[in-house]
Amino acid sequence: MSSITLTYFDIPGPAEAIRLAFYVGGIPFKDQRVSRQEFAKIKQDLPFAQLPILTVDEEVFPQSAAILRYAGKIGGLYPSDPIAAAKVDAVIDCMFDIQAVIRPSIYETNAQRKLSMRKELSEVTLPLWLQYLERWLERAGTTFFVGEEITICDLVIYTRMKWLRRGVLVGIPSTILRNFRRVRAHSEAVASHPKVDDYYKNGPGKVTGDGSPPIPPSPPHSPLSPITLPSNGD
């Protein structure tokens, strides 16, 4: 079996759905979490100067979506049927669109403008996108977004909805999903999946009360060790 190492910061972020995909799919992997200082030292050696990256034996590749699909394919969480796979991709891309409309408010430094942007997000933009997800689930007629079994798109939506519901984005209420019954039910279904539940109780997703990863990480996190990137021409 290949040696797999996922490298990201010690936060959920885009790596959380990937960690879940490996865990739910039963794929052993090294969960390597680095500090900002450690990232600065290796940044210029990374393929696109960003994290996460995945190291599979001697291959290093970036981009969370590519890594997530790889994890889904080897863990049985990504459909082999082209139509079903396209639907999974569509839901993932929808979530990326949602993240894209939120992102400017995260980097806004003016407090008043930030609050104004968040007001627009919470009252107009996010409800519109959440209604799209609600409608998708209604038309699908299933608990999960594509078919009867959990796929990587469910993990992406679940982790991002969990983030929104934590209330950590000032100006966006933790009750943002209040009017979206199917999206809430989806989050509850994913959370109650035996392997997802175990991930957060006993696995890499074990967190402290405020939703932050524990410091230092609890087993089965890999102990932090110097990062060595194989020379593969990147």
Image (tube, helix red, strand yellow):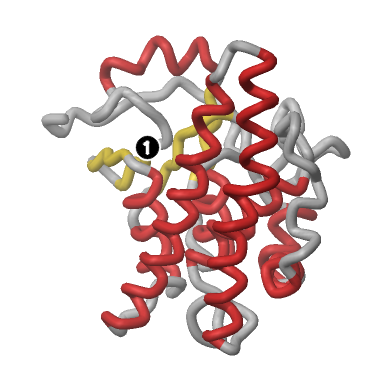
Say whether residue 209 is left or right of residue 79.
right
Residue linked to disc 1: 53
Depth order, front residue of 185/219? 185
Seen at 69% across and 44% down, the residue is 122
Q: Residues within 10 Å of mark 1 (few under 14, many from 20)?
A: many
In the rendered view, tell whether residue 142 sits above or below residue 46.
below
In the image as oriented, which residue stretches furthest toward the right?
A: 209
Residue 221, percent from left and from top: 63, 40
- Would residue 119 be found to the left or right of residue 65 on screen? right
Q: Which residue does the image show at 82% across and 51% down from the upper left?
A: 175
Percent x, y of residue 55: 34, 41
Q: Is residue 151 above or below residue 107?
A: below
Q: Position of residue 155 (x, y in %)?
A: 56, 61
Question: Is 96 on the left-hand or right-hand side of 123?
Answer: left
Which quadrant would the N terminus be assigned to in this image?
Answer: bottom left
Where 198 sits versus 108, above or below?
A: below
Identity of the residue drawn at 16% across and 30% down:
234
Q: Amino acid at mark 1?
A: Ile
Front residue of 116 and 43: 116
Which percent across, then down, holds residue 142?
Answer: 60, 86
Residue at point 80% right, 60% down?
178
